[in-house]
Image: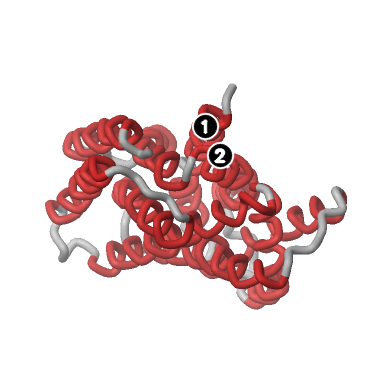
Amino acid sequence: MDKTASGWVNGFIGVLIFSGSLPATRVAVMDFDPTFVTSARAAIAGLLGLAMLLLFREKRPQRGDLVSLVIVALGVVVGFPLLTALALKHITSAHSIIFIGLLPLATAIFGVLRGGDRPRPAFWLFSCIGSALVAGFALTQGVTASPVGDGLMLAAVVVCGLGYAEGAALSRRLGGWQVICWALTLSLPIMLVLSFATLPPSFAHIGSHAWIGLAYVSLFSMLIGFVFWYRGLAQGGIAAVGQLQLLQPFFGLALAAGLLHEQVSPLMVVVTLGVVACVFGAKKFAR
């Protein structure tokens, strides 16, 4: 398997793992405070990441890499988890998943700015069509439904796209799993303090579903998924492989309907299928 094909396979595995993030977060914040979920997931993943770095005796990043690692940490370790956790207090995971369709465009834009990608003009056409479908869906729901929740999701998409692109560019030098482990380790002291500061006064009311949701976002969304995702972006190109995120709403909606029994409207399905179709056109013109 050549490098590009390997990148798409790794990217696809990462997207599958990330598809469960919003439903799992939705379950976790039903019983846990969103700030605790954000800090706890980062702290748990950070401890595991630090253990991996020590076990494999990885060399420390160069001083010039620290700024990039801070951007990764702010984008995907703190920013996206916190903003989505707050958003899911106002909207359902099924509604929030649709906004993930904007991530490929955000990732592609930052891939050009930070990663040096240069997709062909037709690529941007397909990427923008997919994003327009997502934005159009949000408007049909009415801005009065939950402007706070929608605004938080849009902010989450922007910071996540930056974190993805920055991490992918850095992965070309440090390696995929090393980047997320160093970013988690960098934020570990703050996340540990914040976790203890936001601990629930009692765990008696915490259901098993919330613990399972927290475990998923800590192990898979915050660590394992990034091992495949950053490797895929580095191998296949940030803008190109980033379009696989257009598939994420499809898997996420299936999980939201199957596990959380949330309503998935026909319009959600139509928009998702249209967005998924755009990934194939974007892939063809990505380079």
Circles 2 and 1: CB distance less than 8 Å?
A: yes
Q: Where 263 sits versus 78, above or below?
A: above
Labelled disc at residue 30: none
**Could you say where residue 10 lies in the image, as x and y percent from the top left?**
56, 34
Please tell me in which quadrant of the rendered image residue 89 appears. bottom left
**Could you say where residue 280 lies in the image, as x and y percent from the top left?**
31, 30
Asked if residue 146 lies left or right of residue 59, the reply is left
Query: Which residue does the numbered mark 1 point to in the structure image?
Result: 4
Neighbour class for label 2 at 10 Å: few (<14), some, many (≥20)?
many
Neighbour class for label 1 at 10 Å: few (<14), some, many (≥20)?
some
Q: How many marks?
A: 2
Identify the amino acid type marked 2: Gln
Labelled disc at residue 235: 2
**Could you say where residue 86 lies in the image, as x and y percent from the top left?**
42, 66
Frontmost residue, 98 versus 131: 131
Q: Secondary structure at mark 1?
A: helix
Q: Where 151 sits versus 281, above or below?
A: below
Please tell me in which quadrant of the rendered image residue 274 appears. top left
In percent of the image, x 65 and y 63: which residue is there?
183
Placement of the C terminus among the 4 image quadrants:
top left
In percent of the image, x 54 and y 34: which residue is there?
7
Q: Secondary structure at mark 2?
A: helix
Q: Where 89 sits versus 270, above or below?
A: below
Snapshot colouring:
secondary structure
Frontmost residue, 153 versus 186: 186
Q: Earlier in the sequence, mark 2 or mark 1?
A: 1
In percent of the image, x 79 and y 63: which residue is there?
60
In percent of the image, x 62 and y 58: which residue is there?
41
